[in-house]
Image (cartoon, helix red, strand yellow):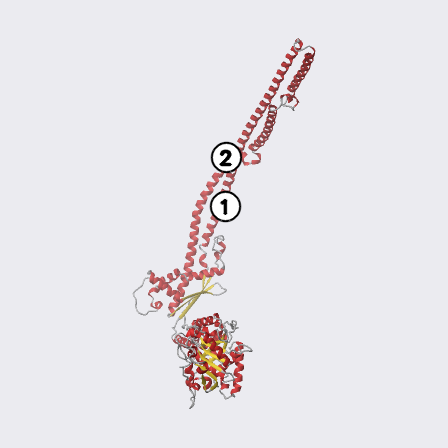
Amino acid sequence: MGVSDTPPAFSTAVTDTTLSEALITLRKRKRILLVFVLLGLAYGIYRAEMQPRIFEAFGRIQVRSGSSNEYRMSNVPGMNTDSSQRMLTEVAILQSDSLMLTVAREMDLANNPDFLDDKAPQPRASIDDPAVRQQTIHTLKAGLHIAQVQKTDIIRISYQSLSAKLATDIVNKVIAAYIQRSYETRFSSSQRISNWLSGQLDDLKQQVQASQERMLDVQKRLGILGMDPTRSQINASLEQLSTAANEARIARIMAESRYRMLSGMDPNSIEGSIEITPGASGQLSALSTLRTQLATARASYAQMESDLGLNHPQAKAQKAQIEELTKEINTEQQRLVLQAKQVYLAARTNEDETRATLDSEKNDAYKLRDDMVEYTIRQREFESNRNLYEGLLQRLRTAGVEAGLESLEIDVVDPAMLPATPTLKPKSTVILTYLFFGFLAGVILAFLLESLDTGLRTVAEIENIIELPSLAVIPRFSRRSATEIPGQSFAARNIISLSQPKSQSAEAFRSLRTALLLSSAGHPPKYILLTSATPSEGKTTASSNLATILAQGDSRVLLIDADLRRPTVHHQFGLNSKVGLSTVLTGTTTLEKAVQAIPEIPNLDVLVSGPMPPFPTEMLSSETMNRLLEHAGDLYTHIVIDSPPVLSVTDAVILARRADAVVMVIRHGKSSKHVVRRARDLLLRSGAPLTGILLNAVDVNSPDYYGYYGYSGYSNAGADAETWQSKADTRSAQDSGEGNR
């Protein structure tokens, strides 16, 4: 016994809702659809017969541009709008509450019995009451229809009422009230503009006068020189002072440099320097002469000192002359330095005074510039106020002309006439309309119920949900329908494959056999386990019939009832359950002694559950169970195991790991999507070789399986059993390869 790998995930090729699936849904919910269609038909007939005799009066008006457009103020926003926007605006005005209130007040509709559709006398109501006003306007708007005639400037106004005269009067009154309102609003608007402009003109006139006076004051203050900046005396003075300031600065720099040079120079080199001050060449010549005399005296003194000695009178006289010349040279040097300092101080003073005068002139020039700017501002202010005043004065005269021309824009093309006959819809139109809405409501409800239905009904839906192929589809059958033959055994009456071998159900089980044998190429599964998500889904019936079909060939088959909690296999075959699987697992008996043969099927042995043990899970997961299955595998070709539901206990998950093929039985219309998906996940996570699904107890008359069993007539026509078997096997092989749709 081997455990095969988990099969790959299976997915259907078509997941989107197609037209055929929609038709199947409608066929399934045909009762709901039929009920809504009949309700729509009945209500349509009732509405067609009970149509009220409503009279409709209508009138047409033309909204023209008007002759006053050439006088309109083009710069006023909203006056020159697009034609389509203007027509939409006029339609909205015709539907406004204020216009409806005017019509209702003038016609006293709040107390008109024809308008209120109430013939009984009522206390007089006031239109000023908010509740009465709201109700009256709402009723008036409900019967009034206003629309623009396409590609024209014509508006159609109609009203529907049980009274022909009332409908005519309301339409004519709406047209009259609209024309009157148009004239009054436009005239009052023009008057408001005129009044506003008149008030603005007075203010502007005063502003113009004030701005003119301020401009003249600035002009007088500036004078003639201030009017021409290129000839201004201040500008000329600024240029001269700027030049003088630069020259004074240069003179100060030169004097300062001479002074600092003399004050830091070696006194003995002064006579060889550059010219100290302007006109100082004479002083430098005298200093040079004194230095020459000093040098000559020192030379004579040195000669006398060597010839005559230091105490000779001529030598002393010469020494005295040398000292005198030295004093004169020092005095001359100090005088030159002092003279350079005085020149520097005079140049600095001249520079400061020139700079101060230049700053003063600059301040005067800045003041002149500010006055010129103020003059320019005053002049522009005066011009702007004057232009605005003149423009508003012109528009004031234009607004006065418009006030008398606006009332000519609306023309009555067709006044409302008294309708001769009421307006009735064709009965066929009314009936077909409500019939269509009834059908539409039925379709919506059918698809809504279908979307809320969590049950699994179609093969495609189940394959899409659990991503596993469908091995076979078993139609619904009842054992009571089997023909009782005298002397027939209990098993022959309960097993549909024995009682009705040519039925749809028997052929479906043959398809299951073929699909399982072809599920693994080269080595058909030996251990086949059938389980379900929840109880009462038909796994025992499927196990019994599958074992019977397998045993009808040359294979030896053992059917094991592994449901030790609620065993039912022995009821299918009418066997005794005192000795079975539980007794074999406890060692009380052997497999050969516990199995029971079925006389009608020589190759089939059944191992019933036996007495119910206290711990079924531990018994099924024991090593004894493994040895039992291995021993059975040596004796039989196929072992079919009927296990408990997956979600109820863990017995099926334990046994599934020891099987070669696991089939999940799903009862049509019973299991829900999340329950089946949960059971599949448990089996896959445990490593069970989940081969596919078996859809059980299918209603062959259901729209979901329309045509699925179209071959049944051929089967019941008495065809040869082996030929039928060959066709069924061929179809089963195709079903297993193509998803068993």
Q: Amino acid at mark 1?
A: Asn
Residue at 47%, 75% (x, y): give it: 626
Residue 149 image offset from top left, x and y in percent: 47, 65
Q: What is the secondary structure assignment of the residue under circle 2?
A: helix
Q: Residues within 10 Å of mark 1 (few under 14, many from 20)?
A: few
Asked if disc 1 and disc 2 are in contact, CB closer than 8 Å, the reply is no
Asked whether 182 or 322 is in front, the reply is 322
Using the rendered view, name the quadrant where residue 43 is placed. Answer: bottom left
Residue 172 image offset from top left, x and y in percent: 40, 65
Residue 496 appears in the rendering: yes
Q: CA distance from mark 1 to mark 2?
A: 26 Å
For the image shown, how many numbered marks are present on the structure?
2
Q: Is residue 128 above or below residue 258?
A: below
Question: Which disc is residue 236 wearing?
Answer: none
Asked whether 33 or 533 is in front, the reply is 533
Residue 732 image offset from top left, x and y in percent: 52, 80
Question: Which disc is residue 221 wearing?
Answer: 2
Q: Viewed as shown, does residue 204 lie left or right of 311?
A: left
